[in-house]
Image (spheres, helix red, strand yellow):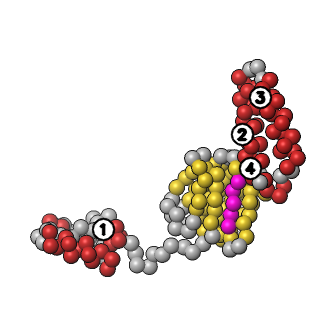
Amino acid sequence: MFRRGTASLLPHRRLFSTSDVPTAAAADEPFAAAWRRIAPNVDLPKTPLAFRSSTTSAASKLTINFTSRYSSHFANKQADMVVAPGVTGQIGILPGHVASISELKPGLLSIHEDDQVMKYFISSGFAIVHSDSVVEVLAVEAVTVEQIDPASVQKGLAEFTQKLSTASKDAEKAEAQIALDVLTSLDSCLV
C-alpha cells in the first residue's frame, strides 16, 4: 500500500523495483488464498515463483568446455551429465544445475552423452558451473583412460610405497605421499 501511495509522488521508478512483477503465479494460488484470509489488508508478498519468467526453462543438455594446461579437449560440446572428482566428493552435474565453482582432485572425470561415456583422468583443477547449463572444466593435466598403462601404474605404486617407507626427511615423505595419492587415483580409474 505504501508503494502505491509513493509511486504517484515520485517522478521516476526504482531500477530494481519488484512492482513490475506479477503478484502471484498460478502455482502460488493456494498461498495467495491463505494470505488473503490471514492478512486481508496487507499486500501479497512476491514469492520466488513470481520472479521466474514464464519463458525460462531448464536446458535439456549441458554445454561443456574442457581444457587442460596444454590443450583444449573440446569446446561447446553437448552432453547429458558430467561427473567430476571434487575435493569434497563426487560432483554430478546435470542441466539446470545451480551455479557453482568446485575444486577438483585427482580422479576420473566422466562425460555422459546419450549412451556414450568419455572418461578422462585429471590431476586437479576446477569445475565451474554457470546458471545457463554451461560447464567449464579446467584441469592441470588430463588424459583419456585408454592412454593409461596399468603396468606403469602398478610399478609406480610399488616404487613410491617403498620410497615412503624409507624416506627420512619430511620433504621426501610428502613427495612420496603425493605420488601415492595420484597413483592410487589412477589405479582406481582403471578398475
Q: Residue 73 in the image: state x and y as whole percent.
A: 74, 60
Please report whichever mark, 2 or 3, sits nearer to the chain's N-terminal start: 3
Question: From the viewer's perspective, is the residue at label 2 or at label 4 nearer?
Answer: 4
Mark 2 = which residue? Answer: 181
Q: What is the magenta segment's predominant secondary structure?
A: strand
Q: Secondary structure at mark 1?
A: loop
Please report whichever mark, 4 or 1, sits nearer to the chain's N-terminal start: 1
Query: Label 2 vs label 4: CA separation?
Result: 11 Å
Mark 1 = which residue? Answer: 47
Does residue 13 appear in the picture of this structure? Answer: no
Residue type at the position of mark 2: Asp
Q: Residue at x 57, y 75 (%)?
A: 60
Query: Which stretch is magenta?
Result: 108-112
Mark 4 = which residue? Answer: 188
Asked if 166 appears above or below 142 in the picture, the reply is: above
Q: Residue at x 68, y 63 (%)?
A: 111
